[in-house]
Image (tube, grey):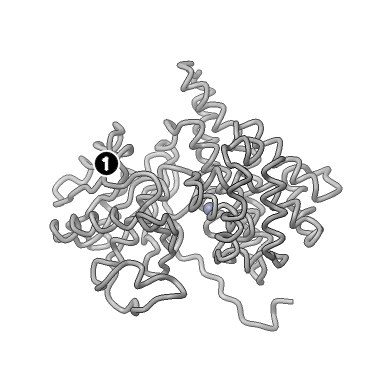
Amino acid sequence: MGAATISTYHFPTKIRFGVGARRELLGALAALGIQRPLVVTDQDVAQLPWFSEIEASLGQLAWETFSGVWGNPVVSQVEAGLVAYSAHDADGIVAIGGGAPVDVAKAIALMAYHPGHLFDYEDGASTRPIDQNIPSIVAIPTTAGTGSEVGRSAVISDDTTHTKKIVFDPQLLPKVVLADPELLLGLPAKITAATGMDALTHLIEAFLAKGHHPLCDGIALEGIYLVSQHLQPSVLFAQRLAAGELLSETEKTAHLEARAGMLNAAMMGAIAFQKGLGVTHSCAHALSTVCNMHHGLANAVMLPAAMRFNVEAEPDKFLRMARVVDPAASSGVVLIDWIVALCKAIGIPPSLTAAGVSADSIEQLVNVAIQDACHPFNPKPVTQKDFYVIYQDALAA
Ligand SMILES: [Zn+2]
């Protein structure tokens, strides 16, 4: 299988990875010919001490900062950012933060020279062509989750309905990513856990997704290994720091290693899921739309039930993933047991009920999930009835 049709393998992002990579921003902008960057970030990141350091590093450049991003990114944030982009007469964007500011930056870049409303350019349902210039983006990630910094799409929600829409274009891919694990050292435990589980879900669903992409499959397996080594330590160090504990020099090094591992795993997840995602993401997207749940948390709570649904369809692939986290594994169920144990260890609620979702919401969740664009890539078809079964399983787990 595979060779009978022509597949696309595409890994174009230049990533500079390591402690201090953020200090290469000025050089990266110069190489792209950007002289008037708009820095797009969220309101929390803009308060962090290292943020003003990055701004100062821009030196003689005429830069402006837009920090009007918070929570799940919505259209009005993109519109405000677009006003800032035009007012500054910017010629490129620096996106600093988690998935939200990176996605807002991409949407601003798209709309800088394209008329109409953002959703006119919805992937698969566009009413206008993407045929104008799209300004270049340099991304500096500060979470290890969505991996949007290495992706070609942006997910933006409608302000009132919370419906998520995707815009996609190869030009939205940041030209350079400065991946600096030091920027993740202050991330709170809950965000570390939820975003890390988003990365793990990308890796697992990409590996299982239909389609022929052995390069992505290899990246996904190594990414799962990195999560197995680095997510729990990242969360535990964050908890200890929040409790006011001081870390020894050895522990500080171990913390940085854990953050670095997760930063790589998150980028690998987003690179791998160009192959496709699956049923977990469809369930999670509905939980964000209907219950306003954090995307990573939603994936984490759904992942065991979704994998119980999938495991019999792909026994060999499950066994391969299980052996990544436990070389002695003799069945794919070991992977699911490992996911459940990991969630418990990092403080993820064990069920939808524990996460505050009531049985009354299931019908609405099913109706939203069935329309989602991810589950057609799931290795096993998912019917309306299947979604009921999966949500019921997650409710009581
Ligand atoms: Zn995700």
Given residues 46 and 116, the one toward you in this image is: 116
Q: Is residue 83 above or below residue 263?
A: below
Q: Which residue is mark 1?
A: 54
At horizontal 70% and vertical 52% (from top left) the residue drawn is 390
At horizontal 74% and vertical 45% (from top left) the residue drawn is 336
Q: Quadrant of residue 143?
A: top left
The answer to whether residue 273 is left or right of residue 321 is: left
Assign the C terminus to one quadrant of the image.
Answer: top right
The answer to whether residue 324 is left or right of residue 269 is: right
Picture coordinates of residue 242, whole percent (x, y): 46, 22
Given residues 254 and 78, the one toward you in this image is: 78
At horizontal 33% and vertical 79% (from top left) the residue drawn is 128
At horizontal 62% and vertical 54% (from top left) the residue drawn is 280
Q: Quadrant of residue 364?
A: bottom right
- Residue type, label 1: Ile
Picture coordinates of residue 212, whole percent (x, y): 66, 71
Q: Quadrant of residue 138?
A: bottom left
Picture coordinates of residue 215, whole percent (x, y): 62, 64
Q: Among all residues in the image, which is located at the extreme bottom? A: 4
The answer to whether residue 370 is left or right of residue 249 is: right
Picture coordinates of residue 91, whole percent (x, y): 20, 62
Assign the N terminus to one quadrant of the image.
Answer: bottom right
Q: Among all residues in the image, which is located at the extreme front? A: 360
Given residues 150 and 371, the one toward you in this image is: 371
> Tag 1's secondary structure?
helix
Note whether residue 307 is visible: yes
